[in-house]
Image (spheres, rainbow, N blue to C red):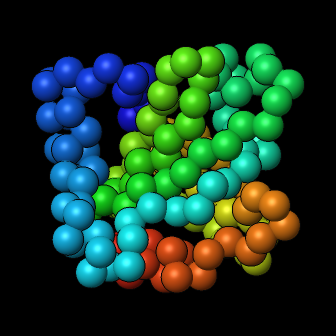
């Protein structure tokens, strides 16, 4: 599910919560050691994201939010915030030291990401995602 989340309505928020679950509360996130990823660079993506990511020549960044039933990948397009929400049941990901490929098996949409500033992908975050995805 790809949505413009700049100005969320109650119905849009309800749809996201049904799709991937409610956001973790501050205390739940604190107990988990955080529920968000580091800043990631978008290397390549499915053509459905082209209107958002292929027009500008600047580097595109995103981050991933863990939720109880899925993940939310968020990035900026001009002044808008775009969210891609994937339930764990259809999530497929491949992780290496410096790169991460995320794919929705149901739709076939994908994004190839890499860590920013020559960092490695955060292993603690990947372990949390692996545990939640089961």
Say which of 98 and 80 sits in front: 80
| Quarter of the figure with residue 51 | top right
Q: Is residue 4 left or right of residue 120?
A: left
Q: Is residue 61 left or right of residue 8?
A: right
Residue at 67% x, 43% y: name it: 61
The quadrant of the image that shows the N terminus is top left
How many marks can you see? 0
Q: Is residue 90 left or right of residue 28?
A: right
Residue at 74% x, 74% y: name it: 120
The quadrant of the image that shows the C terminus is bottom left
Give residue 15's position: percent from left, percent from top.
20, 34
Q: Please say whether residue 90 is visible from this viewpoint.
A: no
Give residue 70's position: percent from left, percent from top.
34, 57
Give residue 119's position: percent from left, percent from top.
77, 70
| Quarter of the figure with residue 59 | top right
Say which of 55 and 46 sits in front: 55
Residue at 19% x, 52% y: name it: 22
Q: Is residue 122 above or below residue 91?
A: below
Say which of 50 and 83 sits in front: 83
Give residue 12's position: percent from left, percent from top.
22, 26
Q: Please say whether residue 19 is visible from this viewpoint.
A: yes
Q: Is residue 102 above or below residue 27?
A: above
Residue at 63% x, 28% y: name it: 49
């Amino acid at each position: 599910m790809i949505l413009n989340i700049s100005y969320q309505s109650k119905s849009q928020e309800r749809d996201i919560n049904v799709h991937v679950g409610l956001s973790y509360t501050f205390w739940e996130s604190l107990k988990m050691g955080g529920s968000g990823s580091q800043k990631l660079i978008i290397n390549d993506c499915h053509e459905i994201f082209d209107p958002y990511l292929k027009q500008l020549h600047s580097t595109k960044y995103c981050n991933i939010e863990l939720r109880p039933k899925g993940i939310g990948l968020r990035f900026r397009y001009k002044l808008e915030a775009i969210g891609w929400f994937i339930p764990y049941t259809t999530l497929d990901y491949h992780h290496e030291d410096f790169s991460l490929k995320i794919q929705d098996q149901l739709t076939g949409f994908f994004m190839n990401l890499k860590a920013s500033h020559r960092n490695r992908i955060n292993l603690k975050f990947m372990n949390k995602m692996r545990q939640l995805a089961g």
